[in-house]
Image (cartoon, helix red, strand yellow):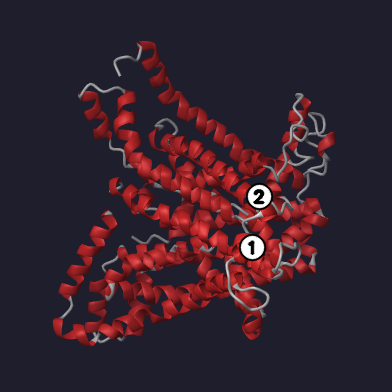
Amino acid sequence: MAAMTGAGRRWLTRLGSVGPTFVVLLCAFFFIAPLLSMARFALQTVPVVKLGWSTLFDKWSLAPLVQAFDEPQFRSSLWLSVRLGLGTVLLTLALLVPTAVWVNLRLPRLRPVIEFITVMPYVIPAIALVAGIKVVQPHARWFLDSKMSLIPFYVVLALPFTYRSIDAGLRAIDLRTLVDASRSLGAGWGTTLFRVLLPNLRTAIISASFLIFAIVLGEFTMANVLVRMTLPVFMLQYQGSKAQAGTGLALMAMFATIVLFVVVSRVTRPRSERRSATSLSTAAATGDDE
Amino acid sequence: MTGLVRSGLRGRADVGAAPAVHRERSAWVDWMGVAPFFAFLALFLLVPAVSVFLQALRHEDGSYGLTAFREAFSGQNRSAFWFSIRFSALAALVGVAFGTPLAYAAASLQRPRWLRSVISSFSGVAANFGGVPLAFAFLTLLGRQGVLTKILSNVGLDLYQSGFGFDTIRGLVTVYAYFNIPLMVLVTLPAVDGLKRSWREANANLGGTTWTYWRRVGLPVLTPSLLGGFLLLFANSFSAYATARALTDSSMIVSLRLGFFLGGDVKVGEDAVGYSLAAWMIVIMGAVMALYWPLRRRAERWQR
C-alpha cells in the first residue's frame, strides 16, 4: 500500500481510535433512548404534545406501575406464566441432564449429532411450530387443549440455549472420574446423579433455569396463536385499553427480564473474571464457597 | 472443523478407557439412554414440523400435490415473502454494520475499564429483549405521539410525512436493530478476541500498515464470523413474531400473515396455502441455517 499518502494513513489511524468511541456513543444513545421514553410515558402523566422544558418535571408518579396489579386478569395471567415457567424448567432438567450425562459418558461420538439437533428449533421457529400444533390439535385435544400443554413445546423452544449450557457445565467437571468413584463406592445411578453430579453442576443448572424462566415469561408467539392468556398476551391486550398502565407493566416485565439475565451472566462468568469482581451481589449470586 | 477433530479424538480415548468386555453387551443399552430425548423431540418437534408439510401438500379433495406450495409464493403471499426477505436482510446488515465495530470497541478500547463488561453483559440481555415490551418502548419513542417524533418535528423533520411507519422496512429495521446489534456483538466478540496481538506485531515487523493488517489478516480471519453473524441475524429477523405483532397489524410480514391465518383473521386461499406459508418459512430458515453451520465451524478455528 505504498500508494497511500501519509495523510490518508494518519486519517486511518485516527479513525482506528475515534471510530470505535463514536460507535459506542451512538449505540449507547440508541439503546438508552427507548427505555427512557418508555419510562417517561409510564411514569409521567403529561401528553407528548404538552411536553417541554416547563412541564418536564410535572406529574411524575409511580402509581401506573402497580395499576395493572389490581386487574384480576393480570394475576391469573402472571400465575399461568409462572406455572409454565416452572414446568418448563423441571421438564427441561429432567430430560436434558440425564441425556447430556449419558452422551458425555457413553456416546461421545453422538455429540455432534445432538449439537446439530439442538439448533433445530432455529430452523422451525415458534410461529411455524405452532402451525404444526394447529394441525395436530384436532387429533389430540385431550392433551393440546389443556393450558399446560405449552410446556413441552417451550422445552423445545429453549433447547438451543439449555442444552449448550448444561453440556458446557458437564465438560467443565471430570465427569468420568466422579461417576467411577461414586459407582465403585456402591452408589446406584440415582444416587450418583442426585448426590454427586447435580451438586457439581449447580452453576450450570441454576443459570439454565433462570434462562428458561426468562424465555417462558416473555414468550408471546405460541401463547398468542393458541389463545392462552399468558403475561405477554395479557400485556398486549391491556395496553390496547390502558396505554399508560400497560406500558408501566411492560416496563416492570423488562426490568424483571434484565434481573434474570444479569443473574445468569453473573453465575456463568468465568472464574478468573469472577474473582476480580468485589461486589457483594456477585458473591451472593454465585454462592462462591471457595 | 476443530470441533469435529477434537470430538473425534475424545471419542477414541473414551472407548479405550471403557473395559472391552463391557462394550458389546452394553451397545444397545447406550442407545436406550438417549431414547427418551429422541422420543421427546420426535413427538414435540418432528411431528408438528412434518404435519405442516403434509397439510401444505394436501388439497381440499384429499389428493396430494404442489399447487398450494406454489400458490403460497404467488400474488399477495409472494409480495409478503419478498418484503420480509428484504427487511430481514437489511436488518441483518444493520446489525452487522453496528455490532462488529461495537464488539471491536469492547475488545480494544482500554480507557473505561468497565466498558467491555458493560457491553458484553448488556448484549447478553438485549439480544433476548425482542417481544412485546420492546415494541411498547419504541411506540413511546417513535410512534405518532412518540417523544423523538415530537423532537424531530420541532426541528422541522416530520417522520410520518416522510413515510416512516412501523410497518415499513425503515421502521422494522430500526426496532429489530435493538436485538440484532447485541446478538452480533455476542457472535463476533469471541472472534475479535481471537485476533492475536502478535499478528499485528508480525505485520508491523514485516513493514505492513494498519491497512495491510486488516486487508490481509484481520478481515480474512473475521469473514466467516461476519457472514455467519449476518445469516443468524437474518434468520432472527425473518422468524420474529412477537415484536412485529405488537408494533403493527401488517400482513406483509410473513410471520404475522401466518399468525393471522392460524387465528382465522386473514383469508390466504385454501387451508393448504396457509400451511404452505409455514412450510416455506421452514425451508428458508433451513437453507439459512445450512449455510450458517459450516461457517460457524470455520469461525471457531481461530478462537482457541
Q: Chain of mark 1?
A: A
In the depicted view, which residue is nearer to us: A289 or B80?
Answer: B80
What residue sits right under mark 1 in the picture?
A221
Residue drawn at the location 51% of the way across and 69% of the way down: A156
- Asked whether residue B28 is in view, the answer is yes
Q: Position of residue A38 (x, y in %)?
A: 70, 45
Query: For residue A113, what is the image quadrant?
Result: bottom left
Residue drawn at the location 51% of the way across and 72% of the way down: B45
Q: Position of residue B79 (x, y in %)?
A: 66, 50
Look at the image and tell me in which quarter the C terminus of chain A lies. bottom left
Instruction: Name the mark on residue B79.
Output: 2
Q: Chain of mark 2?
A: B
Please say if A21 is above or below B193: above
The residue under label 1 is which amino acid type? Thr
Q: Position of residue B122 (x, y in %)?
A: 52, 46
Q: Would you say B163 lies left or right of B31 here?
A: right
Q: Position of residue A216 (x, y in %)?
A: 58, 65
Q: Would you say B29 lies left or right of B178 here?
A: left
Instruction: Name the mark on residue B259.
Output: none
Q: Would you say B96 lies left or right of B69 here?
A: left
Please say if A110 is above or below B246: below
Q: Nearer the viewer, mark 2 or mark 1?
A: 2
Look at the image and tell me in which quarter the N terminus of chain A lies. top left
